[in-house]
Image (cartoon, rainbow, N blue to C red):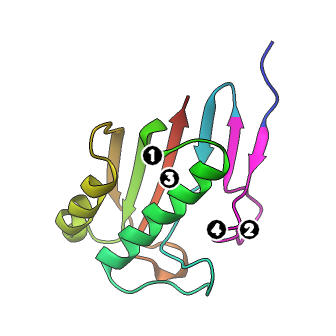
Amino acid sequence: MSSPLKVINSEHAPKPIGPYSQGIEGNGFLFLSGQIGIVPETGELVDGIVGQTRQVLKNIDEVLRSAGFSLSNVVKSTVFLRSIGDFPQFNEIYAEYFKSTRPARSTVEVSGLPRNALIEIEVVAHK
């Protein structure tokens, strides 16, 4: 018998701006909705690809923690970049957060993101 799904929301990450949850947990997996570089306390989008990448990863870490997970539990990430030209800067920051356990990853360039963000990342974690 499968376990029921649990809605995950962290007060330390930006609140959803639509009909979705920050995350859904079930059967040992946690699926996080995409995060952009919004500072939860102000609701403002940080400037630049470096700042946004750091904020996105902080937001992801907070949602993971609220469910008892950590970045080391991430098995897959999907990265959406407004410009693939930002890949080297994004990749350098990303490597700081995923040192020993590096999840599988896809990175794609998209024509637009919410609030005109430069990056959005969604992850799947397992424990």
Which circle, 4 or 3, is nearer the viewer?
4
Query: Pointer 1: what residue?
Result: 71
Q: Nearer the viewer, mark 2 or mark 4?
A: 4
Q: Nearer the viewer, residue 16 or 28?
A: 28
- Label 2 belongs to which residue? 18
Numbered range of the magenta stretch: 6-25
- Secondary element at tag 4: loop
Q: At x 71% / y 72%, what residue is drawn?
A: 17
Vertical position of residue 53 compared to residue 48: above or below? above
Contact? badges 2 and 1 (CB < 8 Å): no
* Proximity of marks 3 and 1: CB atoms separated by less than 8 Å: no
Whether 2 is drawn above or below 73: the answer is above
Task: Give SS at disc 3.
Answer: strand
Image side of residue 77 versus residue 10, left or right: left
The residue lying toward the viewer, choosing from 72 and 74, is: 72
User: Which residue is under mark 4?
Assistant: 12
**Marks 2 and 3: CB-CB under 8 Å?**
no
Mark 3 or mark 1: name the one nearer the start of the chain.
1
Residues tagged 4 and 1 counted as in contact (Cβ below 8 A): no
Q: CA distance from mark 2 to mark 4?
A: 18 Å
For the residues marked 2 and 1, what is the alpha-carbon distance in whole angstroms? 25 Å
Q: Which mark is residue 122?
A: 3
Q: What separation in Å lies between label 3 and label 1 (alpha carbons)?
A: 12 Å
Q: Residue at x 77, y 18 (%)?
A: 2
Element type where label 2 sits in the image: loop
